[in-house]
Amino acid sequence: MKIMIRRSPDAGLSIYVPKKDLEEPIVESEYETLWGGWVKVANGWVLDLPEMPSGTPLPITINAKKRGGKGDDP
């Protein structure tokens, strides 16, 4: 699914899903650099992110893969 990842001063890192008009903060990530691992967002979704250089500028639109169902652990 296409998502946008951005950083805001209030919420920190968050994702935006245009097709669902959904914005959620990222609450946990597998790697500090985000890329190539999973992230968990506040609504319980776990998304696998693609490999990218650690200095990739935000905001950025990427293809992420959603794991399992809501509330699944990574």
Image (cartoon, rainbow, N blue to C red):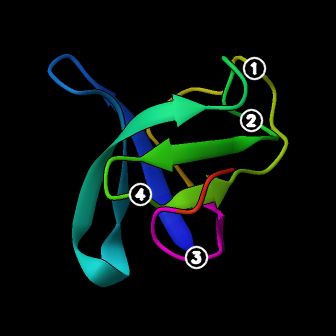
SS class, disc 4: loop
Task: Look at discs 1 and 2 and give the one toward the viewer.
Answer: 2
Tag 4 or tag 1, which sits nearer the N-term?
4
- Is the Cβ of the residue at disc 1 closer than 8 Å to that at disc 2? yes
Q: Residue at x 41, y 57 (%)?
A: 44
Q: Which mark is residue 24?
A: none
Q: Which residue is mark 2?
A: 35
Dot 1 lies on which element? loop
Cα separation, mark 1 vs mark 4, equals 25 Å
- CA separation, marks 4 and 2? 19 Å
Tell me the tag on residue 44: 4
Where residue 25 appears, x then y in whole percent? 31, 40
Q: CA distance from mark 3 to mark 4?
A: 16 Å
Locate residue 31, reporting x and y percent: 72, 24
Closer to the chain start, of discs 4 and 2, is: 2
Sequence order check, earlier mark of 3 and 1 = 3
Q: Earlier in the sequence, mark 3 or mark 4?
A: 3
Single out the residue that lies furthest toward the bottom: 19
Q: Amino acid at mark 1?
A: Ser
**Residue underneath mark 3:** 1
Q: Is residue 51 left or right of residue 61?
A: right
Q: CA distance from mark 3 to mark 2?
A: 16 Å
Query: For this view, does 16 lie left or right of residue 29?
Result: left
Q: Residue at x 46, y 71 (%)?
A: 70
Question: Dot 4, how many residues are within 10 Å of its Cα: few (below 14), some (14-19), or many (20+)?
Answer: some
Q: Residue at x 65, y 63 (%)?
A: 64
- Secondary structure beneath dot 2 equals loop
Q: Nearer the viewer, mark 1 or mark 4?
A: 4
**Which residues lie in the magenta part?**
62-71
Q: Amino acid at mark 4?
A: Gly
Residue 57 occupies quadrant: top right
